[in-house]
């Protein structure tokens, strides 16, 4: 399954009332990102230049719209299960398409059964508390990659990759060409072709003591 974070994605900033949260939220709004809400414990009911502030992420969930993607990172390494079935149920009910997070999740069986796509760095039964503020709709770093609001996210069973928004069209064209090439290769292999010939590997093997299986059996039989 693949999910896309694009210019239509609506983001919520954790810690929006802090200096960094305010700065990045307003900069991203100028960039064109839809910053729809912010979260800072104890600041619920306020606003930051028209952006409503809520006390917890749970309160901000009500701002989510169908098609939204939630991308979360933490300010320090954390493998605890911060996301689980109940929050996924709430997000799914609002049409959220998936979650990507640098921390951990729990309730993996339930998440599979409800078919809610989530990619995280860890799986842990250890839950978390609901006290620390954060930021929404700001650039985050996961797996050594910087993800900015509006970037494309492609995720499947093998992992997650990010494509900068301005490179999406070029990446899509290159992907289509790669798919066409692999379709052709797959047909050749299914018809009995060998990768040694298809990929031009025989000249490289000529430089090493490469023998066929039949030759190996012959030599083994002769005690060579």
Image (cartoon, helix red, strand yellow):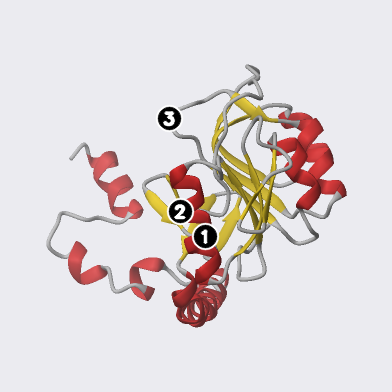
Residue drawn at x 76%, y 30% is 109
The relative height of residue 36 versus residue 85 in the rendered view (above or below) is below
Relative vertical location of residue 221 with respect to residue 4 in this rendering, above or below? above
The residue to which callout 2 is attached is 23
Query: Is 5 situated left or right of 59 in this image?
Result: left
Q: CA distance from mark 1 to mark 2?
A: 6 Å
x, y percentage for residue 38?
Answer: 64, 47
**Residue 75 x/y as whole percent:** 45, 34
In the picture of the structure, the residue carrying the numbered disc 1 is: 26
Circle 1 sits in a helix, a strand or a loop, which is it? helix
Q: Residue 195, image x and y in percent?
A: 39, 67
Asked where in the image residue 56 lies, by quadrant, the reply is top right
- Separation of residues labelled 2 and 3 (CA atoms): 20 Å
Q: Which is more toward the observer, 202 or 148?
A: 148
How many neighbours does mark 2 have within 10 angstroms: few (below 14), some (14-19), or many (20 or more)? few
Left or right of 70 on screen, residue 111 = right
Classify the position of the C terminus by image quarter. Answer: top left
Residue 172 appears in view: yes
Residue at the spot 54% in from the left edge and 75% down from the top edge: 179
Classed neighbour count for the residue bearing mark 1: other residues with Cα under 10 Å, few (<14), some (14–19), many (≥20) = some
| Residue 118, quarter of picture | top right
Q: Nearer the viewer, mark 2 or mark 3?
A: 2
142 vs 197, left or right, is right
Q: Which quarter of the rendering shows the N terminus?
A: bottom right
Q: Nearer the viewer, mark 3 or mark 1?
A: 1
Nearest to N terminus: mark 3 or mark 1:
1
Judging by the rendered image, the residue that carries numbered circle 3 is: 76
Q: Earlier in the sequence, mark 2 or mark 3?
A: 2
Tell me, for residue 138, which label it has, or none: none
Label 1–label 2 contact, CB within 8 A: yes
* Residue 219 percent coordinates (x, y): 24, 45
Q: Residue furthest left?
A: 207
């Amino acid at each position: 399954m693949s999910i896309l974070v694009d210019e239509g994605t609506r983001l919520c900033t954790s810690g929006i009332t802090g200096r960094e949260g305010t700065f990045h939220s307003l900069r991203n709004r100028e960039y064109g990102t839809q910053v729809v809400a912010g979260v800072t414990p104890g600041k619920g009911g306020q606003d930051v230049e028209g952006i409503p502030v809520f006390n917890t992420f749970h309160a901000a969930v009500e701002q989510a719209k169908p098609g939204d993607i939630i991308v979360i990172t933490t300010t320090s390494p954390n493998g605890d299960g911060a996301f689980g079935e109940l929050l996924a149920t709430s997000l799914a009910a609002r049409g959220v398409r998936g979650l990507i997070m640098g921390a951990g999740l729990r309730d993996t069986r339930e998440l599979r059964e409800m078919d809610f796509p989530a990619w995280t760095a860890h799986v842990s039964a250890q839950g978390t508390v609901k006290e620390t503020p954060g930021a929404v709709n700001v650039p985050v770093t996961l797996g050594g990659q910087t993800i900015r609001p509006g970037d494309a996210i492609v995720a499947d069973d093998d992992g997650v990759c990010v494509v900068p928004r301005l490179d999406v069209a070029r990446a899509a064209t290159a992907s289509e060409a790669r798919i066409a090439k692999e379709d052709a290769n797959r047909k050749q292999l299914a018809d009995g072709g060998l990768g040694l010939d298809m990929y031009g590997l025989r000249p490289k093997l000529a430089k090493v003591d490469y023998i066929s299986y039949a030759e190996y059996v012959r030599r083994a039989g002769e005690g060579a």
